[in-house]
Image: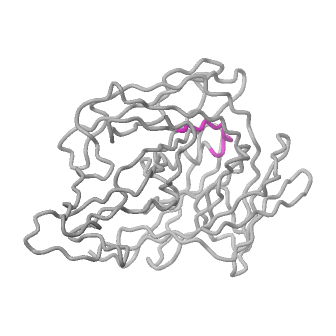
Amino acid sequence: MKIKHLKIYFFIFSLTILLGCIDTYDIDFNQKNNVLVVEGFLTDDYQNPDTIKIQYSRYVERSTFISPIASVKASIMALGTGKEITLVEQKLGGFLPPTDFRINPSEKYSLHFALPNGEQYESAPEQIYTTPPILKVYDKFNAQSRLSDDGKKFLASNDIFLDFKDTPKQKDYYLWRYTHYERIVHCTTCYNSAYDLNTLGCTIKLASFNRTPYYDYQCAGECYAIIKGKPINIMSDVVSDGDLVTGRLIAKIPYHYLYGCLVEIQQMSISPQNYTFYRNLELQSQSTGGLADTPAAAIVGNINNVTNSSDKVVGYFGVVSIQKKRYWVDRKESNGEFDYILSHPPVEEPADPRDTSRPPMIKCVKSATRTPFKPADWQ
């Protein structure tokens, strides 16, 4: 059914340490309009800084379309010194701090940017909080981790846990993220067609009597999937102040293959305001994923339009310290049915003795979700 209009409910809340009081704004606009979404952190991981994304999100006929905005001027303001740090725009969208930038722990920072239409935006001040180290990471095979999409069976995973020591005598709020690296065998799937080396696409039509609805094509060389964890994982230390926190569930890594995979875990201390933002987003979206993918209701964070106060911006800009650990999941205890990374059992195009170019091998093209380069600490 075609959707003519989409009602998006923006939630604006006054932030307190433990509870956000949410007011609802019912804004009705045509589905062709764009919602401005801002997300990203200024971090002390200077080798791999976060990309600060300023983009439009548009929801049309139950699908989300994300588009970067050209010619945005963005900077970070150090409020104590008044110094402006110009952010560097990236080719594929988003902004990074200059390579020589370092966070001053006693400073507060604010994101400022201007759109091509002249609209000016800025975030509320944020400052860095010390993050305790991750003490231990471990996993446990779970044969009944989650239900399949059709609800007919349980799927297996390796559940990843960590331990850390909370800092005593202070209020702490934590956010965890993870990236899952998986070596993949197949780089392309063609549905009701075969891969054409001339067009570099699935453009060869299959005969009507072909009973295979798809063919999977192997990668030409090594290829690794880069899978960002989507669930929102946050915690307040209200009941664990100064304690050793054990068995914090961080990720459920699907049982894709017999051989192992790599998981990078990031632990961050965040501000009370940032915690409240993620808590409300978690409650509203049921952990659906990134901000730009959040359907229908979206959470307004700490970004304000200083040109037009009635303009509501989705998202949050934060300043965080990151503690990281990479963990190898050997899958030695894993067993049972695979949770196929392709979402189906692989079916390869049969070899043709008359044409040695069939089936073709597909190049692994570097992108945000794939790389031909072996990740650090891969075993």
Q: Is residue 336 left or right of residue 184?
A: left
Q: Total marks drawn? A: 0
Choose top left, top right, bottom left or bottom right for residue 167. Answer: top right
Q: Against 29, is 135 above or below? A: above
Q: Is 251 covered by the magenta stretch?
A: no
Report x, y in % for residue 277.
59, 48
- Residue farthest to the bottom? 117
Report x, y in % for residue 356.
26, 66
Choose top left, top right, bottom left or bottom right for residue 68. Answer: bottom right
The range drawn in magenta is 264-274
Q: Residue at x 84, y 44 (%)?
A: 104
- Residue farthest to the left? 209
Q: Is residue 176 left or right of residue 335?
A: right
Report x, y in % for residue 209.
7, 71
Q: Residue at x 37, y 58 (%)?
A: 187
Report x, y in % for residue 283.
46, 46
Q: Residue at x 71, y 39 (%)?
A: 321
Q: Is 272 covered by the magenta stretch?
A: yes
Decide which of 267, 279 is in the foreground and name it. Answer: 267
Q: Residue at x 59, y 44 (%)?
A: 276
- Residue farthest to the top? 243
Decide which of 139, 163 is in the foreground and name it. Answer: 139
Q: Is residue 45 left or right of residue 196?
A: right
